[in-house]
Every structure is written in structure tokens, then in C-alpha cells.
Image (spheres, rainbow, N blue to C red):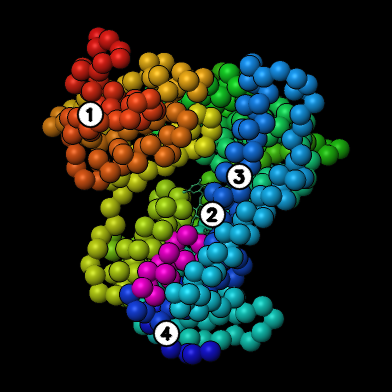
């Protein structure tokens, strides 16, 4: 294999592989180093398998809840083994497609652990083979993250698991405790609750999805509880014990100051992620990291080592696949001569509960804390015709504008919120005003009409609710 490359990328997840394809499009000779599976966490152990399981269990749940069906519905079972097989097939298909795409773009893939040395060199340790050292004009680090652990609750792959094992449980546990009510905790809890597990979600902070718009997540919490998830906030876990195949989790409620104890066959640890930065560079390379080992970058995504960039989960912030991919594009374009700054103003996120929660920009609390004079428009889905036809009226769309009417944030609870929030993302990234959003014609009946109505409500001009 050639020893000299224009661009070497370490890590083949959504950050690294997108950067590799764009690099090849920009006529770079690209080497992509991956020590496990192309597609990274997202394709193999994250976004894709989780969404497959969420979709399948939603079909099962919706069928059982549909009051208009007749026949022996109680006999319908979820064939979990088959669901797992089909999920693996879907993942495999995506990974194969991606490998094909990389190859057709001329990206060379090498399997092995990558590590940066000084002098723009990358060392690769292929499994069972000798070290190979390559020279690179530019380097992009995209090694992602792994589940974080608690000192008194360590995953053992059996009773205490991370999302990785939780996506592949062979049996449905009778009881499951989920530690952490972030996106992963809520999605995994939802999957197993739909399959019949009694799921308790314990969160140390006062709301689910900490840091999100309070009004919106309070409503989500109510909906999830009504669906049968046991959600407990302000729960500080202090110890755990495994006995006879069960885990006992003890702690103190920060609200009542009283002790609690929960017991389950499975505990899913979903308390955040840690960067894969250990062993990524030799000490002498001097790669700069913060106290928690997230790699430091400047607004152009360059690390303290000139010509070496870092992207994706490895640099922290919101740990999202589309953030990693966008950073991949910015980093590779900067590596080939541009001078672009990464802008996170309109970085969206979604949680695939039912209804979905999707959000972009500032929360009401963040805007107020910044001293901004804001205007908000909230439109409940009770007044949306499409939501009624879907039997899903518990959600809402909330739009926040600044005093000049510019859209600065939106928080949506609705079926397919992750799809139709794109309209608001575009409005935000192009600096549109609420009037520009509300004056475009929306198809009837759609959930996106609620976006138009929420934008109208900002100016107290909504049509389908009273503007009081
Ligand atoms: C259960 C779950 C569900 C999720 N759902 C969503 C979702 O719906 N939407 C969303 O946006 N995000 C979601 N995420 C987050 C998303 O998966 C990550 O943000 C995303 O994968 C980060 O991309 P990345 O390229 O930075 O890193 P990764 O995807 O982690 O890829 C890094 C790659 O680098 C490789 N690697 C590590 N070290 C080395 C080394 N030294 N040498 C060579 N290779 C190395 C790893 O094997 C890995 O393949 C989810 C995550 C989980 C766990």
C-alpha cells in the first residue's frame, strides 16, 4: 500500500466517512483507518438499529391499542428473534452500501487501530499484523465515543448493560431500570416498555432530556408516564448490588431527601458518553484535550497540531451523527484550503419517542438567560386536523422569536417531528422572520400546518386557536 496520502482519516463513523467521501470529491488521495466496522456507532450500534427496534415495537403497540380492529388481537406476539435478525440485516445492508460508495469514490480503507505520531505521521496496527506508518498532508481524527460509566455501577454485559448490549438482548426482561433520561435512555426504555417490560427510568436532574425546553419536555414526561413508563427525576443513585441475577439500585431522592431502592433483572446505563481519545496519539504529539479528554479544536475544527483536525463525538458538544457529518464537511474543506467556521446555531436534534421530540436553537430558558426579549408561539396539536386523523393530539409546536421577529428556536412534540422540523431549521439557518414562515402555504391536512400556526401565534394571529 502507498505510504503517502493527501488525507488520512482515523475513524469511519458518520464524521469520518462523510469527510472521506468529500475529500475524494475534492480530488484528495484519502486513506480511511477504521478498527472495527465502517459506519461507526451510528450505523452499527446507535441511530439505525435503535430506530429499527423503535419502529417495529411501535407497530406492535399501535396494533394492540387500535380500538377499531376485531379478531384475536391478543394472540399477536412480537417475534423478537426475527426482529433482531431483520435489524442486523438492515444494518449490514447499509454498511455494505457505504463500503461500496467509499470504494467507488476512490477512498482506500485500512482496518486497524490508528494513532497519530509527530511529523504528520499515522501509525496503523492491523489485527495480528505489524505496524504500518503512513505520511499525511492532513489528518482528521473522528474516533467517536463510548458509553460513560459510573464508579458504583459498572456494565458487565449481563445484568448491567450499555446501549450496545441493550440493542441485542435475547430475552425481554420482566423489569428494567434505565439510568439516565437522555435520548438514549428514553428510546431504549420505550422499546422495552412496548415489549412488556416494567421500565423505570431514573434521572438525577429535574426533567427528562436535561437542557431541553422545559415546557416541552414537561409535556413529554407526562405523555411517557401515561404510556406506562415509570419516570423518576431528581434521583441520586449511590450504590448497586447484584444478587441472584438481579440488580438492586439504591440512592436518595433529591426532592424528598428520602432513600429509594429499585430492583430489576437488567439495568441499562445511559448516563452519557466518553471520548475515544485514549491511545489516539503518542504523548509527544501533544494533542490538546480538556480535563475529560474531549479533543480541543478551534472554530475551523483544527486541533493544536497544525494540519490535524478533529470532528464528531470526539470533540464533545452535542453527540449527534449529523453534527459529526457536518463537521466532517467543514474540516475536510478547511484541510483543502477553505477557511470555514463551524456554526452550531441551527443544530437540530430528535428523540424518537412517540410522539417524537425534536428541537433546534435556543430554549426559552436559554434565551431569557441571555437577556433576550423574546416572543413565543405555542400551537397545541389538539387543534390540528391531521393530528386528529392520526389519533395523536397530545403534542405541540413552540416557536421562539427575538424582538426583531427572527426565529431563534423551536421545540416540537409530534409524530414525525424529526422530519417536519426541517422547515424551521432552514428558516433559522437563513435568518428568516416568523412572518416569512407563516406566510408560506402549507399542505392541508398536515402536521406541518402546526408550524405555520405556531409562527402565526407568535404575533397572536393564529387561525385555529384563540389568540388570548
Ligand atoms: C443507541 C444510540 C442511538 C443513537 N441515536 C442517534 C440518533 O438517532 N441520531 C443522532 O444524530 N445520533 C444518534 N446517536 C449518536 C451517534 O451515533 C453519534 O453521535 C455518532 O455516531 C458520532 O459519529 P462519529 O463519527 O463522531 O463517531 P462514531 O460513530 O463513534 O465512529 C467512530 C469510529 O471510529 C472507530 N475508532 C475508534 N478509535 C479508533 C482508532 N484509534 N483507530 C481506528 N478507528 C477507531 C470506531 O470503531 C468507530 O467506528 C446514537 C447513539 C447511540 C449509542
- Ligand 1 within 8 Å, label 2 CB: yes
Do the CB atoms of the residues marked 1 and 3 lie less than 8 Å apart?
no
Residue 232 image position (x, y, % from top left) = 58, 25
Is residue 74 positioned above or below 249 on the image?
above
Mark 3, Cα crowd under 10 Å, few <14 / some 14-19 / many 20+, is some
> First in sequence: mark 1 or mark 3?
3
Q: What segment carries the magenta color?
A: 11-25
In the figure, is residue 463 to the left or right of 165?
Answer: left
Front disc: 3 or 2: 3
- Residue underneath mark 1: 438
Q: Tell me the element at label 2.
A: helix
- The C terminus lies in quadrant: top left
> First in sequence: mark 1 or mark 2?
2
Alpha-carbon span between mark 3 and mark 4? 37 Å
**Residue 5 — which label?**
4
Mark 1, Cα crowd under 10 Å, few <14 / some 14-19 / many 20+, is many
Q: Tell me the element at label 3.
A: helix
- Residue underneath mark 2: 42
Front residue of 201/58: it is 58
> First in sequence: mark 3 or mark 4?
4
Do the CB atoms of the residues marked 2 and 4 lie less than 8 Å apart?
no
Residue 350 image position (x, y, % from top left) = 45, 40
Alpha-carbon span between mark 1 and mark 2? 35 Å
Give the residue at x 44% y 28%: 414
- Residue underneath mark 3: 52
Is residue 271 positioned above or below 434 on the image?
below
Mark 2, Cα crowd under 10 Å, few <14 / some 14-19 / many 20+, is many
Amino acid at each position: 500500500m502507498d505510504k503517502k496520502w493527501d488525507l488520512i482519516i482515523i475513524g469511519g463513523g458518520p464524521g469520518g466517512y462523510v469527510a472521506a467521501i468529500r475529500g475524494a470529491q475534492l480530488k484528495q488521495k484519502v486513506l480511511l483507518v477504521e478498527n472495527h466496522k465502517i459506519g461507526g456507532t451510528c450505523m452499527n450500534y446507535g441511530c439505525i438499529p435503535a430506530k429499527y427496534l423503535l419502529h417495529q415495537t411501535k407497530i406492535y403497540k399501535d396494533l394492540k391499542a387500535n380500538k377499531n380492529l376485531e379478531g384475536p388481537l391478543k394472540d399477536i406476539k412480537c417475534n423478537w428473534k426475527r426482529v433482531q435478525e431483520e435489524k442486523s440485516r438492515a444494518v449490514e445492508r447499509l454498511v455494505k452500501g457505504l463500503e461500496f460508495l467509499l470504494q467507488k469514490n476512490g477512498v482506500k480503507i485500512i482496518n486497524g487501530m490508528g494513532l497519530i505520531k509527530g511529523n504528520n505521521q499515522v501509525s496503523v496496527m492491523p489485527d495480528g499484523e505489524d505496524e504500518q506508518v503512513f505520511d499525511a498532508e492532513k489528518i482528521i481524527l473522528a474516533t467517536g465515543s463510548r458509553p460513560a460509566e459510573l464508579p458504583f455501577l459498572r456494565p458487565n454485559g449481563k445484568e448491567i448493560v450499555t446501549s450496545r448490549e441493550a440493542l441485542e438482548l435475547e430475552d425481554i426482561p420482566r423489569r428494567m431500570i434505565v439510568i439516565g433520561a437522555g435520548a438514549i435512555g428514553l428510546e431504549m426504555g420505550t422499546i422495552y416498555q412496548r415489549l412488556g417490560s416494567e421500565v423505570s427510568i431514573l434521572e438525577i436532574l429535574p426533567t427528562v432530556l436535561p437542557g431541553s425546553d422545559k415546557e416541552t419536555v414537561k409535556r413529554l414526561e407526562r405523555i411517557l408516564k401515561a404510556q406506562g413508563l415509570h419516570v423518576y427525576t431528581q434521583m441520586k443513585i449511590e450504590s448497586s448490588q447484584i444478587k441472584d441475577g438481579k440488580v438492586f439500585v439504591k440512592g436518595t431522592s433529591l426532592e424528598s431527601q428520602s432513600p429509594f431502592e429499585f430492583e430489576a433483572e437488567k439495568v441499562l446505563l445511559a448516563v452519557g458518553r466518553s471520548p475515544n481519545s485514549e491511545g489516539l496519539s503518542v504523548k509527544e504529539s501533544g494533542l490538546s484535550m480538556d480535563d475529560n479528554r474531549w479533543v480541543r479544536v478551534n472554530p475551523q475544527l483544527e486541533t493544536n497540531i497544525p494540519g490535524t483536525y478533529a470532528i464528531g463525538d470526539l470533540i464533545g458538544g452535542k453527540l449527534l451523527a449529523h453534527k459529526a457529518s457536518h463537521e466532517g464537511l467543514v474540516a475536510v474543506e478547511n484541510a483543502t484550503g477553505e477557511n470555514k467556521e463551524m456554526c452550531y446555531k441551527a443544530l437540530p436534534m430528535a428523540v424518537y419517542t412517540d410522539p417524537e421530540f425534536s428541537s433546534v436553537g435556543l430554549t426559552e430558558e436559554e434565551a431569557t438567560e441571555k437577556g433576550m426579549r423574546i416572543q413565543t408561539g405555542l400551537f397545541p396539536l389538539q387543534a390540528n386536523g391531521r393530528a386528529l386523523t392520526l389519533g395523536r393530539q397530545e403534542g405541540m409546536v413552540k416557536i421562539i422569536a427575538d424582538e426583531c421577529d427572527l426565529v431563534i428556536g423551536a421545540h416540537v412534540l409530534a409524530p414525525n417531528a424529526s422530519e417536519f422540523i426541517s422547515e424551521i431549521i432552514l428558516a433559522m439557518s437563513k435568518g428568516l422572520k416568523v412572518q416569512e414562515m407563516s406566510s408560506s402555504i402549507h399542505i392541508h391536512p398536515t402536521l406541518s400546518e402546526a408550524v405555520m400556526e405556531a409562527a402565526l401565534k407568535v404575533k397572536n394571529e393564529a387561525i385555529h386557536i384563540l389568540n388570548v
